[in-house]
Image (tube, grey):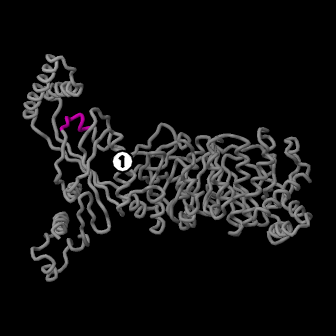
Amino acid sequence: MSNSKNIASLLGRMVGSPPLPKGGAASLRQKPLTVTDVIAPPAIEVDFDLLKVGDWYYRTLFVAGYPRFVSANWLEPLISFNHTLDISMYIYPTRSEEILENLKRKVGEMEATIQSDLKRGRVIEPSVQVALEDALALQQELAKGSERFFQFGLYVTIPAKTREDLDKATKQVEATLGSLLIVTKKAILQMEEGLKTTLPTGKDRLVVTRNMDTTSLATTFPFTTSELTANEGILYGLNEHNDSLIIFDRFTLENANSVVFGKSGGGKSYMVKLEVMRSLMFDTEVIIIDPENEYENLTHTLGGEYIRFRFGSSTKINPFDLALLSGGSNDESELGQKILSLHGFFRVVMGRLTPTEDALLDRAIILTYKQKGITPDPSTHSKEPPLMEDLYKTLVGMEEVLAKGLADRIEKFVRGSLVGIFDQQTNVAIRNQLTVFSIRDLEDELRPIAMYLILDFIWNKIRYNKRRRLLIVDEAWYLMKYPDSAQFLYGIAKRARKYYLGLTTITQDVEDFLATEMGKAIIQNSSMQILLKQSSAAIDTIAQVFYLSEGEKHLLLAADVGQGLFFAGPAHAAMRVIASPEEHEVATTRPQEALAEKPGVNQAPQHDAQPVTQEATALPKSNRPIFTVETVQTNKTG
């Protein structure tokens, strides 16, 4: 109970309310509740090596030994530790006259020790020799007045929800500091004093200090704000910590993949559109899968090609198409690669297949190609590929019960209500620097199929012709719903680096995306991660996957539109997305702003696919985005 009184009294003094009265609980019942009563924990349990305050466990470490030499920002691994830590530094200035007198006495003692060893023929202790050199150098600097002397105390309190997490975090902190040659000790039997020492009261109750001069002390300053300003790349936003520009080239990382998570209306598409506009200026080809027509205005404004997939549209992609692969390498069987891709496609179309059905489907696909004269021989790949209708006829012609069942599953795409979508020859080609595939007008059940088919079509193009590209998959959770489409997207993420490709996956349904192992694997294979405003329902899942601290969780919950966290390799910072007025006009998706626009503005004629034989068209210079640096509007992010 005395410990509870001490903590409550301390908390009361922090907020300016009176301490606990002498009468204890009986006296409290006679008086109204104070702020101290409200914020005080229900119970405090003091153990010899930890402290339990309410439901939380705390353990305090103090630094007992330091390395002889340190570099600037040597505490950065501790400040940037991936667990919430309360770190306190106490600096006590001392009088140089007293230190010089003590140094003079110490120098005399060490010189006498060395002389005694020499007279007796002993080997001089290296530690004594090094300490003498350091003391003489410090004595000279202090005498000149170029250095001052301080005592420095460093304490770390580790909070955790469970005892196991506390022990694990303690070992990690000790290992991290041990790698810096820093010796840490637990404040055994002084955990209460340790917690009070790291509270923002400025009172050192442990008083475990080390002598330091001005230069050594300066290196402890926590210069830990992540600087993400490079000499190359594009602008992503402002660093909220120091208002510096976040200018970054994602292709300089281990891989150029990125993931963007945020709740609906958090500014995901807005930020990605800004990245697209700025990337186009550096000769980057951009391909987008657009489920909600959010990129239509952007495409028409920048002179890109907007390809629609819908009923009655002339835009067609044949799942069996081999045209793009005919010019590829002969080191691997392109037909074999295509057949493997078709297996994944038809699992999305048909649903789960048994091993027997899968083997039967494999025989039917090979036979369908063979009936068109296409074999593993690359010289046959230029022939007209089969259609889904040919596979349907092959399955029916097998006269097996299982084959008939497989044929029934695809009949609606060949002769039923969905005829004409996936059963015609390909008549589109990626020939523009900005190409967007729209699937908004397809039913929800067809979207995963269309996204898989378009991704396969794009991936063949990427393999066929390497260049700097961005592939943006919006609402990627559609693909995560099916194991085969999720596996296909993960395969692209793993292999993208080899083809100079940066894959961007965007989703607002974070829990659906992370519910599968493939979703987590895609995050692990994405060197750049952007977290925008999150909902309270998803924040715990996000925090677990990205190892967010409590402060970072609160930042994402309270973030405004266009604010969040920017991760690039080991560095990360709080970010605010900014855009010029001209960029904002093109990127915004707010309905009220779209309705306010004048009729006819940025409304280029819509079109379906054009003939494949048309030459590639470059992005018109007159339609490229215009940037201004004089006026930056940060309140229109949407």
Q: Position of residue 524 (x, y in %)?
A: 54, 51
Q: Is residue 314 visible?
A: yes
Q: In percent of the image, x 20 and y 43: which residue is there?
A: 152
The boundaries of the magenta stretch are 211-218
- For the residue pair 507 and 285, the one nearer the viewer reads as 507
Q: Position of residue 370 (x, y in %)?
A: 90, 51
Q: Is residue 419 left or right of 136 when viewed as pictured? A: right
Q: Is residue 223 visible?
A: no
- For the residue pair 437 and 489, the one nearer the viewer reads as 489
**In magenta stretch: residue 216:** yes
Q: Is residue 62 left or right of 624 when viewed as pictured? A: left
- Residue 28 in the image: above or below residue 244: below
Q: Is residue 255 left or right of 412 when viewed as pictured? A: left
Q: Position of residue 237 (x, y in %)?
A: 46, 50
- Residue 299 in the image: above or below residue 536: above
- Residue 111 in the image: above or below residue 612: above
Q: How many marks?
A: 1
Q: In percent of the image, x 72 and y 62: which residue is there?
A: 449
Q: Quadrant of residue 297?
A: bottom right
Residue at the extreme bottom: 30
**In magenta stretch: residue 546:** no
Neighbor class of circle 1 (other Cα within 10 Å; few <14, some 14-19, many 20+) is few
Q: In percent of the image, x 70 and y 47: which residue is there?
A: 432
Magenta: main secondary structure equals helix
Q: Position of residue 239 (x, y in %)?
A: 41, 49
The residue to which callout 1 is attached is 242
User: SS class of the residue under badge 1?
Assistant: loop
What's the amino acid at mark 1?
Asn
- For the residue pair 545 and 588, the one nearer the viewer reads as 545
Q: Quadrant of residue 213?
A: top left
